[in-house]
Image (spheres, rainbow, N blue to C red):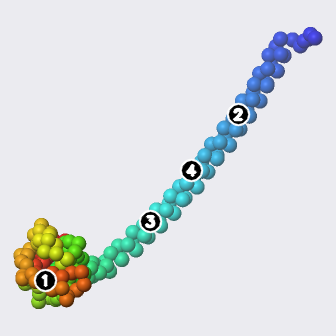
């Protein structure tokens, strides 16, 4: 098919189409600019609101800080009292720990007959009455207590053979130990 339009008319029609495309791009661009301006304005409003809220929080915190200065003094006093209580509790002696430590050092074949623990006996040697299956068990007991860091000043008393005593443990004896408070 032949195009019978003159060249100048064809040229003007192409220019008209390009102008329509350019007008569409300009309209799209102007809508985009308006949208971005609106988004910036809304963001600005949110930021102003956040700033106002933050300033109010700062004012409230400053007034709370002023009222809490007396609370800080009270907390300092409580901290001192807790430190004092901690010092007192750190010097406290746990009798169950002492008994557990003694039982850990006892060799097989030795049983305790009597043991007295109280505040008065902790500063001095503790006398323990015990029974053993043989004299060898008492020697092992002596070695174990001398090698233990929880106890010191081990001394064993007279050892007697008593067949009428505790069944299976004919050797009766007593020994003394001192408890080392610092070691656990």
Spatial separation of the CA atoms under disc 1 and disc 4:
102 Å
Outermost front residue: 163
Instruction: Select label 1 or label 4 by which is in front.
Output: 1
Spatial separation of the CA atoms under disc 3 and disc 2:
43 Å
Determine whether 48 is above or below 101 in the image. Answer: above
Query: Mark 3 or 2 closer to N-term?
Result: 2
Numbered badge on residue 96: none
Tell me if label 2 and label 1 are in contact, CB under 8 Å.
Answer: no
Query: Mark 4 or 2 closer to N-term?
Result: 2
Instruction: Using the image as rendered, state which of residue 57 and residue 31 is in the foreground.
Output: 57
Q: Residue at x 55, y 54 (%)?
A: 43
Tally of numbered discs: 4
Q: Is residue 57 left or right of residue 5?
A: left
Q: Residue at x 71, y 38 (%)?
A: 27
Where's the N terminus, which quadrant? Answer: top right
Determine whether 157 is above or below 141 in the image. Answer: below
Q: Look at mark 2 in the image and give the residue it sits on.
A: 25
Spatial separation of the CA atoms under disc 4 and disc 2:
22 Å
Instruction: Select label 1 or label 3 by which is in front.
Output: 1
Callout 2: SS: helix
Outermost right residue: 1
Q: Look at mark 1 in the image and give the residue it sits on.
A: 161
Q: Look at mark 3 in the image and give the residue it sits on.
A: 54
Instruction: Select label 4 or label 3 by which is in front.
Output: 3
* Res 109 → quadrant: bottom left
Q: Look at mark 4 in the image and give the residue it sits on.
A: 40
How busy is the neighbourhood of tag 1: few (under 14 within 10 Å), some, or many (20 plus)? some
Spatial separation of the CA atoms under disc 4 and disc 3:
21 Å
């Amino acid at each position: 098919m032949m195009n019978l339009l003159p060249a100048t008319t064809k040229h003007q029609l192409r220019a008209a189409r390009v102008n329509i495309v350019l007008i569409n791009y300009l309209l799209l661009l102007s809508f985009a600019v308006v949208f971005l301006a609106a988004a910036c304005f809304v963001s600005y409003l949110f930021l102003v609101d956040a700033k106002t809220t933050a300033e109010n929080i700062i004012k409230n915190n400053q007034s709370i800080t002023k009222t809490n200065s007396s609370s800080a003094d009270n907390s300092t006093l409580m901290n001192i009292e807790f430190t004092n209580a901690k010092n007192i509790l750190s010097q406290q002696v746990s009798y169950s720990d002492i008994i557990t430590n003694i039982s850990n050092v006892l060799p097989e074949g030795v049983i305790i007959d009597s043991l007295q623990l109280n505040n008065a006996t902790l500063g001095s040697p503790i006398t323990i009455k015990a029974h053993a299956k043989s004299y060898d068990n008492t020697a092992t007991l002596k070695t174990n207590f001398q090698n233990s860091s929880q106890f010191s000043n081990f001394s064993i008393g007279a050892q007697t053979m008593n067949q009428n005593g505790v069944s299976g443990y004919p050797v009766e004896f007593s020994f003394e130990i001192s408890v080392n408070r610092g070691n656990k």
